[in-house]
């Protein structure tokens, strides 16, 4: 799915983000507010992902929507 669509409907997708990455807090999700780069950064912090791995995880997740 196109990230612009996820960003535009962030409130709808935030629950799915929480399902996929359960270590994210509600504050994390509010901070992201649909911004892909913010999500990548938070995934790197919470899960210890490398930047490329965070991008791949998000691509895989968004492609399955």
Image: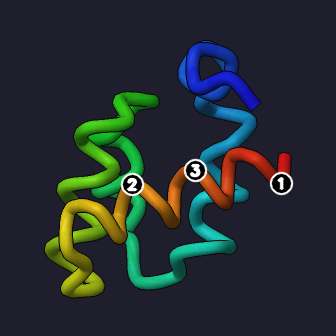
* Residue 8, placed above or below residue 23: above
Residue highlighted by disc 2: 55
Asked if labels 2 and 3 touch by Cβ distance under 8 angstroms, the answer is yes
Q: Earlier in the sequence, mark 2 or mark 1?
A: 2
Viewer-side residue, 60 vs 44: 60
Residue highlighted by disc 3: 59
* Residue 35, placed above or below residue 31: above
Q: Tell me the SS state at disc 2.
A: helix
- Per the model, the C-alpha gap separating discs 3 and 1 is 9 Å
* Residue 64 location, quadrant: bottom right
Q: Which label belongs to residue 10?
A: none
Q: Where does residue 60 sit, x and y in percent of width and height?
A: 65, 59
Viewer-side residue, 54 vs 9: 54
* Residue 12, placed above or below residue 17: above
Q: Residues within 10 Å of mark 1 (few under 14, many from 20)?
A: few
Residue highlighted by disc 1: 64
């Amino acid at each position: 799915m196109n990230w612009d669509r996820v960003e535009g409907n962030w409130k709808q997708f935030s629950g799915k983000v929480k399902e996929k990455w359960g270590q994210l807090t509600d504050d994390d999700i509010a901070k992201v507010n649909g911004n892909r780069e913010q999500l990548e950064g938070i995934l790197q912090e919470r899960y210890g992902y490398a930047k490329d791995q965070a991008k791949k995880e998000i691509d895989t997740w968004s492609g399955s929507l």
